[in-house]
Image (cartoon, rainbow, N blue to C red):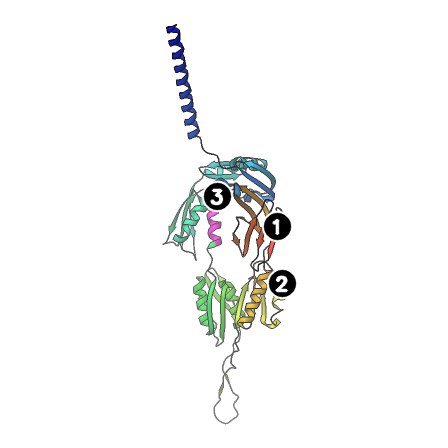
């Protein structure tokens, strides 16, 4: 009896030890297993696949690189889906392939996917306007994991990466390496002074400054160097061209100058000064979304036609008048110069809501409170987005809907 009891006790202890070991192994496995990203709900209608992948990268916490050949629109509704599972469904259903390189998702046609990472090379990208050291941190985020270094001597950046990363760097820098908007005032300034200032602002050399006594009064706010040059050439009566980084005057017209009075036969000729130049405040208003003809028709409600010029090549409206009246013109145009809007999709992740908003065919991932070109996202609801324009107008757009 005693031996039987001892045997039963021994078996119970052995079983208990086995359960403890099993529990410890299971606990260790659970602790070692990665925690999956929170499930998300996604609702997209005819959205660009690249925008969808960018949103999935945002909510999933990974970078996204898409091959230039990746194109197409997708429509789907996914509920309670892990972001990486959603990537698998969206990419494969669109006929493309993908791979994760570290924390970066790479999407490309299947036959080109491997080739994009086989060749690593170093490229130098020259810069004209922006500081190489200042742009490197932002560029590194765009082309991770490529290596980026500033080259102050050569005034540019060096990038070591594959072809796709170098193309991304070139596109990123091309968009940002532009002259800053002008903030210049000229009051009764001669043409030489104005042209020299514009050439310096744009990083240009200047050849053959026109000989003229004309005076200009200009108030330049937010205009580009090219827009300002067009205005000066038109006002002063000459033409120019830009060869590389040089401004060349190619044609000069007659300018107001001192003229000699006709000899009446008595005494020397007397120089008659040119009549004084009547100056007005001139303002260049850049247009983003409406045409110059539309803007001209609107401005004609407040200004006479002779004080309005439309520069179709530069996409600007040049107006002349008092400061107060020109302020009215700018406010009027701001109310109509709005982008084309479309809501491509909405993503809900726990309490976080994101939307893909297309402004004039350029997509952006936005949250409530985001402001883009004067358009503020007021609310992101389950199936629509409420927006407020710069003039305070409220717009309510459903998924797939636009304004």
Q: Earlier in the sequence, mark 1 or mark 3?
A: 3
Q: Secondary structure at mark 3?
A: helix
Above or below, comparing residue 294 to residue 37 in the picture = below
Query: Looking at the image, which residue is at 58% across and 63% down?
Result: 333
Measure the C-alpha gap from mark 3 to mark 2.
40 Å
Task: Please give the label number shown on residue 397.
Answer: 1
Which of the 4 image quadrants contains residue 47?
top right
Q: Earlier in the sequence, mark 1 or mark 2?
A: 2
Image coordinates for residue 140, horizontal then vertical, percent = 42, 46
Residue closest to the far top = 1
Task: Please give the label number shown on residue 164.
Answer: 3
Task: Please give the label number shown on residue 294.
Answer: 2
Main secondary structure of the magenta stretch: helix
Q: Which residues are magenta?
A: 167-175
Magenta stretch: residue 239 in it?
no
Q: Is residue 133 left or right of residue 313?
A: left
């Amino acid at each position: 009896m005693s031996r039987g009891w001892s045997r039963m006790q021994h078996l119970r202890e052995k079983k208990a030890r086995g359960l403890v070991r099993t529990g410890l192994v299971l606990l260790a496995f659970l602790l070692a297993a990665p925690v999956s990203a929170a499930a998300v709900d996604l609702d997209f209608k005819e959205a660009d696949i690249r925008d969808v992948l960018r949103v999935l990268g945002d909510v999933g916490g990974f970078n996204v690189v898409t091959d230039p050949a990746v194109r197409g629109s997708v429509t789907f509704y996914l509920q309670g889906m892990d972001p990486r599972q959603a990537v698998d469904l969206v990419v494969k259903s669109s006929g493309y392939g993908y791979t994760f390189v570290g924390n970066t998702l790479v999407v490309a046609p299947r036959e080109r996917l491997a080739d994009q990472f086989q060749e690593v090379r170093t490229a130098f990208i020259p810069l004209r306007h922006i500081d190489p050291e200042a742009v490197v941190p932002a560029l590194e985020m765009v082309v991770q994991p490529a290596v980026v270094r500033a080259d102050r001597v050569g005034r540019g950046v060096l990038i070591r990466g594959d072809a796709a990363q170098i193309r991304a760097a070139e596109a990123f820098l091309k968009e940002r390496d532009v002259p800053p908007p002008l903030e210049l005032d000229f009051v009764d300034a001669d043409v030489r002074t104005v042209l020299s200032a514009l050439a310096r602002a744009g990083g240009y050399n200047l050849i053959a400054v026109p000989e003229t006594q004309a005076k200009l009064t200009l108030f330049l706010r937010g205009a580009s160097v090219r827009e300002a040059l067009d205005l000066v050439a038109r006002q002063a009566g000459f033409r120019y061209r830009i060869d590389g980084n040089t401004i060349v005057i190619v044609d000069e017209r007659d300018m107001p100058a001192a003229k000699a009075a006709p000899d009446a036969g008595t005494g020397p000729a007397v120089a008659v000064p040119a009549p004084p130049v009547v100056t007005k405040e001139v303002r260049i208003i850049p247009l983003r979304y409406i045409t110059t003809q539309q803007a001209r028709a609107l401005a004609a409600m407040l200004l006479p036609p002779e004080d309005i010029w439309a520069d179709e090549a530069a996409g600007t409206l040049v107006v002349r008048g008092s400061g107060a009246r020109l302020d009215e013109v700018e406010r009027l145009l701001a109310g109509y110069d709005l982008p084309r809007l479309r809501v491509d999709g909405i993503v809900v992740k726990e309490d976080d809501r994101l939307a893909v908003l297309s402004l004039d065919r350029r997509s952006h991932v936005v949250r409530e409170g985001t402001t883009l070109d004067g358009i503020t996202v007021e609310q992101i609801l389950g199936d629509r987005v409420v927006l407020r324009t710069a003039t305070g107008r409220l717009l309510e757009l459903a998924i797939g809907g636009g304004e």
